[in-house]
Image: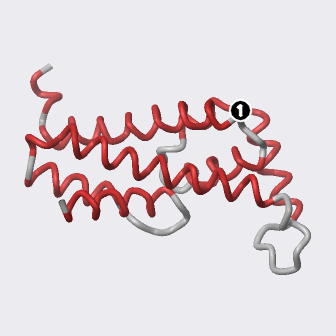
Amino acid sequence: MLSLWALFFSALGAATLLPLQSEAVLVGLLLREPQAWATLLLVATAGNVLGSVVNWLLGRAIEHLRDKRWFPFSAAQLERAQQRYQRWGQWSLLLSWMPVIGDPLTLIAGIMREPFWRFLLLVTVAKAGRYAALAMITLGWFHAW
């Protein structure tokens, strides 16, 4: 049970701007308990999606803070990010699984007021797909096809 909590929190933290690697935790647990693959995928996906929801909520709140002196982004940086999001829109959330760009995308979706239901659906598909592919590679399922 402790390993599931470790997986959940590493996945949650990895979806925020924290430098965590949930993939390594998932692969280790898959190798140790391959029969538990479904539970491990569910826990990793839930944690990672919840971390993205935190980013979305921060994005929603960011507009109220942008004029503060300590705010970490310039108006120009926010404007560029918003323009990119408007160009690709909601479908860019399918890239939320990617390192480096995925976490900021979920933050920008909050800033852009992406409807929560659509955000949750697209991010869940992206994150679950990444973990499923990683599990298939780890457990050698591609060889069976």
Residue lying furthest front:
1
Which residue corresponds to the image point at 54% horizontal and 32% vertical from the top-left?
122
Q: Nearer the viewer, residue 11 or 141?
A: 11
Image position, residue 19 (x, y; %): 46, 69
Amino acid carrying label 1: it is Trp
Q: Is residue 92 left or right of residue 24?
A: right
Image position, residue 24 (x, y; %): 27, 59
Query: How is the rendered protein coloured?
Result: secondary structure
Which residue corresponds to the image point at 13% horizontal and 39% vertical from the top-left?
139
Residues packed near mark 1 inside 10 Å, few (<14), some (14 to 19) or many (20 plus): few
Which residue corresponds to the image point at 58% horizontal and 56% vertical from the top-left?
54
Q: Which quadrant does the C terminus fall into? A: top left
Residue lying furthest top:
145
Residue lying furthest right:
67
Q: Is residue 67 left or right of residue 104?
A: right
Image position, residue 118 (x, y; %): 62, 30
Image position, residue 60 (x, y; %): 75, 52
Q: Which quadrant does the N terminus fall into? A: bottom left
Element type at marker 1?
Answer: helix
| Quadrant in the rendering for residue 132 | top left
On screen, 14 above or below 113?
below
On screen, 101 above or below 16?
above
Please give the count of numbered marks on the rendered protein. 1
Q: Is residue 28 left or right of residue 132?
A: left
Which residue corresponds to the image point at 52% horizontal and 38% vertical from the top-left?
123
Q: Which residue is mark 1?
A: 88
